[in-house]
Image (spheres, rainbow, N blue to C red):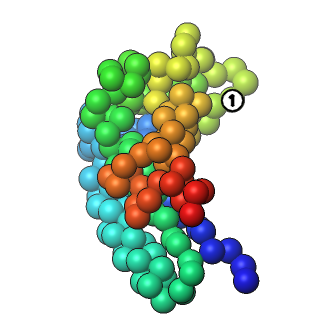
Amino acid sequence: MGARKILVTNVPPVGCCPFERDFNKHSGQVCVKFQNLLVQKYNNQLKRMLKELTNTLKGSTFVYADVYHIFDDIMKNYGSYDFENVDSACCHMSGLHSGLAPCLPHATICPDRSKYLFWDSYHVTESANLIVAKRILDGDSNDISPINIHTLSKT
């Protein structure tokens, strides 16, 4: 019979990670628009494809987790999530947003990683991952559709 309940996450706003902000110096203090436009185009096509698969493969449910939307919300409303920094990496060596060098043993670590969205040039912190996980488990249709994981597990 195979898998019948499948979760697929979309791509987060990669133009907002510290590496992209530092590498694309023309972006200044904002996210890199071109990368995020490409991601949004991909995400729209992915969502369309998952709807088609759900309609085509009877008895299957494909659930679309919109992590792009979740991260966008976190970055816009970071204070309500108890973050102080959503632009720079907690583990840093160089770059305006600490994104030009990897997190190595001699890197500087921020005093409280729970206050940062990004751990390093690309990856988010445990605090951010917990928020995403909770919203995928119990979120509304803005976060995950057609149903959240909690509801899916009961079907």
Q: Using the rendered view, name the quadrant where residue 91 is placed.
A: top right
Residue at position x 54%, y 86% in the image: 57
Residue 127 at x, y = what percent?
Answer: 54, 28
Residue at position x 39%, y 42% in the image: 71
Residue 77 at x, y = what percent?
Answer: 29, 30
Query: Quick one: 114 or 36, which is closer to the camera?
Result: 114
Residue 39 at x, y = what percent?
Answer: 37, 62
Q: Using the rendered view, name the quadrant where residue 106 is placed.
A: top right
| Vertical order, 122 against 141 (above or below) | above
| Vertical order, 57 against 98 (above or below) | below
Dot 1, how many residues are within 10 Å of its Cα: few (below 14), some (14-19), or many (20+)?
few
Residue at position x 36%, y 35% in the image: 74
Query: Quick one: 69 or 150, which is closer to the camera?
Result: 150
| Vertical order, 28 against 9 (above or below) | above
Can you identify the residue that label 1 sits on?
Answer: 104
Residue that protrudes farthest toward the front in the picture? 154
Residue at position x 59%, y 31% in the image: 126
Disc 1 marks which amino acid? Answer: Leu
